[in-house]
Amino acid sequence: MAGPVSSADRFHVDSSGIGQTDDVTDSVGPDPQYELFADEFLDHAREGLYNAHYDRPACLRLLGEVAGRTVLDVACGPGLYAEELVGRGARVIGLDQSPRMVQLCRQRVPSGEFRVHDLADRLHWLPDDSVDLVLFALGLEYVDDRTSTLRELRRVLRPDGALVLSRLHPTGDWLRHGGSYFDVRIVEETWSRGWQVRYWLAPLERTCEELHEAGFLIERLVEPRPTAEAAHVDRDRYERLLREPIGFLAIRALPAPWR
């Protein structure tokens, strides 16, 4: 897992072919894709519309009060979510597949505990019921066995805790990529900064089923709107996000009591 996805350039296609996609059929694999542009991503995501004024506010609202609580920041990226959580009084444990992202996290949030970890592996370094909240922002698309990963997050989450995850909006993906909305498939994409990424497309039903199979109950599902400040960053994208499901969605899920 690399850092969380930013979409500020995902929807920006130019005539050179940037933005083209190719369908592939196997797996995303263990390569830390964001390692190659981690510093550039930090510069982009710090104040970018899709990160600072769209996804982060939505996820933080769903997490609720974090003061005095232990939050596991999964796919923590360069530490922008972690910084906000610590500023609100949380203890943060973070993980990312990219060594450079973890290094950036440690620099940005010295009080946090961050480590390099591939979500294909168990969280052997965390005991059962050891965290109050789990944040999994814009990283689910990069996981091949999503149910196993979610099940492991369920294991380390306390029974009265909550998981907050955000993902690409499947309707927006379908509108951009075409084909069958219900197909679960991998695409490769080059975003307009030249960042090459490879990730899963899946319908909303699949994400809900994966959460169910992992032992979660969905408490809330939101389709975020950008903050008013986003209009000053990019008026056209701000207005489009108010009208169309082309960005992200976010889910708050609770451990099922019978699992």
Image (cartoon, rainbow, N blue to C red):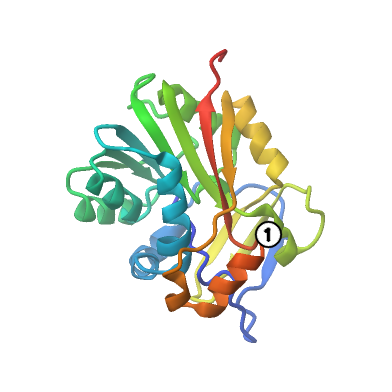
- Image height check: is 240 above or below 102? below
Q: Position of residue 196 (x, y in %)?
A: 53, 66
Quarter holding residue 197:
bottom right
Q: Given the current orientation, which residue lies at the most extreme bottom position?
A: 15
- In the shown orientation, is residue 100 left or right of residue 29? left
Q: Quadrant of the C terminus?
A: top right
Could you tell me which residue is drawn at 57 percent across and 69 percent down? 10
State how many labels appear: 1
**Can see residue 75?**
no
**Can see residue 244?**
yes
Quarter holding residue 237:
bottom right
Could you tell me which residue is drawn at 34 percent across and 38 percent down? 65
The residue tagged 1 is: 173
Q: Position of residue 221 (x, y in %)?
A: 59, 42
Label 1's element? helix
- In the shown orientation, is residue 22 left or right of residue 179? left
- Image height check: is 133 above or below 226? above
Foreground of the two, 89 or 17: 89
- Image height check: is 75 above or below 242? above
Could you tell me which residue is drawn at 55 percent across and 55 percent down? 224
Crowdedness near tag 1: few (<14), some (14–19) or many (≥20) residues, C-alpha within 10 Å: some
Foreground of the two, 142 or 71: 71
Q: Amino acid at mark 1?
A: Asp
Q: Position of residue 37 (x, y in %)?
A: 40, 66
